[in-house]
């Protein structure tokens, strides 16, 4: 799944605008960052492997912390950890 697919999923299913995606203390994507649009086509696991400098051959999932704003742009949604299975 790419960051774009994740963002689209949260918007379609929950009407939430994803602002931050992090995993294991690494910020994988942040909407206020100039690089956010460039990351949209990147797979989440590829960005994690790049930042963590690790090989994901023995890992099949990541626990993502997703922060999002409600459609009103004022309220922040409190979301549970997202278990992202990529294999």
Image (cartoon, rainbow, N blue to C red):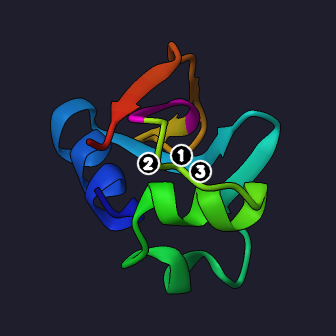
Query: Marks 3/1: CA distance?
Result: 11 Å
Nearer to us in this view, 66 or 77: 66
Q: Quadrant of the N terminus?
A: bottom left
Instruction: Report crowding for label 3: few under 14, some 14 to 19, many 20 or more residues within 10 A (C-alpha).
Output: some
Q: Give the CA distance from mark 1 to mark 2.
A: 8 Å
Segment colored magenta: 60-67
Label the magenta part by its dominant secondary structure.
strand
Up-down: is 77 above or below 28?
A: above
Residue for badge 3: 19
Most extreme residue toward the right is 25
From what the image shows, is residue 53 above or below residue 75?
below
Could you tell me if residue 61 is visible in this image?
yes
Q: Mark 2 points at which residue?
A: 17
Image-based side of 5 in relation to 66, left or right? left
Q: How crowded is mark 1: few (under 14 residues within 10 Å), some or many (20 or more)?
A: few
Q: CB atoms at circles 3 and 2 under 8 Å apart?
A: yes
The C terminus is located in which quarter?
top left
- Number of marks drawn: 3
Which of the two discs, 3 and 1, sits closer to the camera? 3
The percent position of residue 25, horizontal first and vertical second, equals 82, 37
Between marks 3 and 2, how big is the CA–CA gap?
Answer: 6 Å
Is residue 18 within the magenta segment?
no
SS assignment at label 3: strand
Rendered view: 52 above or below 62: below
Expressed as whole percent of the image width and height from the top left, the position of residue 5 reads 26, 59
> Which image quadrant for residue 29?
bottom right
Residue 62 lies in the magenta stretch: yes
Residue 46's disc number: none
Q: Which of marks 3 and 1 is nearer the N terminus?
A: 3
């Amino acid at each position: 799944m790419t960051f774009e697919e994740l963002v689209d999923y949260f918007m379609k299913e929950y009407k939430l605008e994803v602002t931050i995606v992090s995993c294991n203390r690494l910020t994988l994507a942040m909407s206020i960052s100039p690089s956010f649009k460039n990351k949209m086509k990147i797979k989440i696991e590829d960005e994690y492997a790049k930042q963590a400098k690790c090989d994901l051959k023995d890992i099949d999932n990541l626990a993502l912390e997703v922060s999002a704003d409600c459609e009103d742009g004022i309220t922040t949604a409190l979301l549970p950890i997202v278990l992202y299975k990529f294999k």
